[in-house]
Amino acid sequence: MNHQTTAQHPLIDPVPPQGDEARVAALLGIIEQELGFVPDGLRLYGISPPLLETFLGTVGYFRSGAGGLSPELATAELLPAQCRPQLLFAKRTSNA
């Protein structure tokens, strides 16, 4: 049995609640615009639009500097673990 996954074939495909598809698509669009991709962990939050909105609000709060963290550190600490190295790499290469 092959347990490998790729970006084209995720293990699960979370479906937003009926009627909230556009709301979730807009939120995921914000994430993709900011990171260049949507981590699977955040895509999973799409099954609960209020959870996804709360998460993005929390990240936005800390990225604004209101929480006393630099925007880069706040983003890295609040994102799911699997996308932290990619984000930090992207930040380092964009600053080079």
Image (tube, helix red, strand yellow):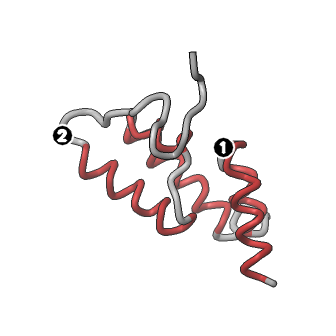
Is residue 39 shown left or right of residue 92?
A: left
Is residue 64 shown left or right of residue 13?
A: right
Q: Which mark is residue 19?
A: 2
**Percent x, y for residue 27?**
39, 55
Q: Between 60 and 91, which is closer to the camera in this rendering?
A: 91
Looking at the rendered structure, the kind of residue marked 1 is: Pro
**Percent x, y for residue 43?**
46, 43
Alpha carbon separation for disc pair 2 and 1: 26 Å
**Percent x, y for residue 18?**
20, 34
Badge 1, how many Cα within 10 Å: few under 14, some, many 20+?
few
Residue at image point 60% right, 30% down: 4
Element type where label 2 sits in the image? loop
Q: Are marks 2 and 1 in contact (CB under 8 Å)?
A: no
Q: Earlier in the sequence, mark 2 or mark 1?
A: 2
Quadrant of the image occupied by residue 19: top left
Q: Which mark is residue 71?
A: none
Quarter of the figure that contains the N terminus: top right
Residue at image point 32% right, 53% down: 25
Quarter of the figure that contains the C terminus: bottom right
Residue at image point 54% right, 41% down: 6
Element type where label 1 sits in the image? loop
Query: What is the number of callouts on the image?
Result: 2
Looking at the rendered structure, the kind of residue marked 2 is: Gly
Residue at image point 73% right, 59% down: 74
**Percent x, y for residue 16?**
31, 37
Q: Is residue 91 above or below residue 74?
A: below
Label 1: which residue? 80
